[in-house]
Amino acid sequence: MIYLGCFLFLCGLARVMASYPIWWSLALHHQYTSLASQPIPCGSIPGLVPKQLRFCRNYLEVMPSVAQGVKIGIQECQHQFRGRRWNCTTVDGNLAIFGPVLDKGTLGRGWGGATRESAFVHAIASAGVAFAVTRACAEGSATICGCDARRKAREEGWKWGGCSEDVEFGSMVSREFADARENRPDARSAMNRHNNEAGRISITDHMYLKCKCHGLSGSCEVKTCWWSQPDFRVIGDYMKDKYDSASEMVVEKHRESRGWVETLRPKYAFFKPPTETDLVYYEGSPNFCEPNPETGSFGTRDRVCNLTSHGIDGCDLLCCGRGHNTRTEERKEKCHCVFHWCCYVSCQACLRVYDVHTCK
Ligand SMILES: *[C@@H]1O[C@H](CO)[C@@H](O)[C@H](O)[C@H]1NC(C)=O
Ligand SMILES: *[C@@H]1O[C@H](CO)[C@@H](O)[C@H](O)[C@H]1NC(C)=O
């Protein structure tokens, strides 16, 4: 059996080193994300805690969607952060797929990385799992779940039809599976639980009524409607706003009957305290300007920057003031397109020259 190229020793090491889920590496392996393949061998998934292993064995048929969900979460992360210093890069062939970057904040100690970036990745990954499972259920690819039969009510002018997506089931799977390891009494667990839930709530909050018209030439005599999840991009944009406005917290220790428990409290009393939909963190991020194997920063050397932008993707900020190089690049493009009656378009191929700016 393929063991993800991971020898027992290395798996153990990665598990000790990473304070974020090793099982996210599921997302990078086609063998897990493709629905058509063999059942997932639960025992070969790295980094599962016993509760997750049991879940995997009991709900085998939703596991490809769980893996798919982490994958769309990571893809969305990479889209949202594409022009930024930290761009959500995953490290190939490493079980800790983000490298040390989500493990270590500015404190640089082994058990840290409670940064905004980490908050975002947790939220988008757990949202992705809820989303993908919900979608798969509605498409009928699992027998234990399906459409949401409760979401029905009659109104004038249209009738229920199609399949209302059962986001509660998807969220339940995400909660059971993604939060299974977040039961430690420490601050990092509290942070992960909060951000995971924020990600899931964002989906519930964006459910909308999708309708289709029937009738002669689009007359909409009959309209069927069902509850649908939004496009995942909507969730990505929303979570990115939450990243920008994330709440900084401080760690507090309490003595309880079960021992010391860490909880989080807002750092600044004059800011609105975070709601359940806000992201929380308690460690500053490195600036990601220079490569640093300690923090997992790749630095921004050779990254493509935007000369005319004054934002974070602009050459000034992205290159951290080091300046940039410019080269020209030729690209083939369609041009001189002509519309022929009826109905096709023919184009020529032209070479266009572009300036490409990269960080020094
Ligand atoms: C993200 O950053 C890495 C490391 O600097 C770089 O290799 C990669 O090309 C970047 N990806 C995008 C889409 O800019
Ligand atoms: C560069 O930034 C400008 C100004 O923000 C924007 O209009 C333009 O689309 C950007 N170009 C690219 C290639 O992203």
Image: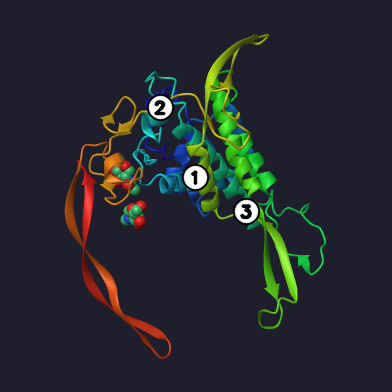
Residue under label 2, please give it.
Answer: 14
**Distance from Cα at disc 3 to Cα at disc 1:** 15 Å
Q: Is tag 3's residue or tag 2's residue first in the polypeptide sequence?
A: 2
Task: Answer with left or right where residue 203 lies relative to residue 162.
Answer: left
Q: Quadrant of ligand 2?
A: bottom left
Q: Quadrant of residue 155?
A: bottom right
Residue 314 versus residue 349: which sits nearer the camera? 314
Image quadrant where residue 51 sits: top right
Give the Cα distance between marks 2 and 1.
Answer: 21 Å
**Residue 356, image quadrant:** bottom left
Kind of residue at disc 2 = Ala
Asked if labels 2 and 3 touch by Cβ distance under 8 angstroms, the answer is no
Looking at numbered disc 1 in the image, what kind of residue is underneath it?
Gly
The answer to whether residue 175 is left or right of residue 17 is right
- Mark 3 — residue? 229
The picture places residue 109, in percent across and down from the top left corner, at 39, 18
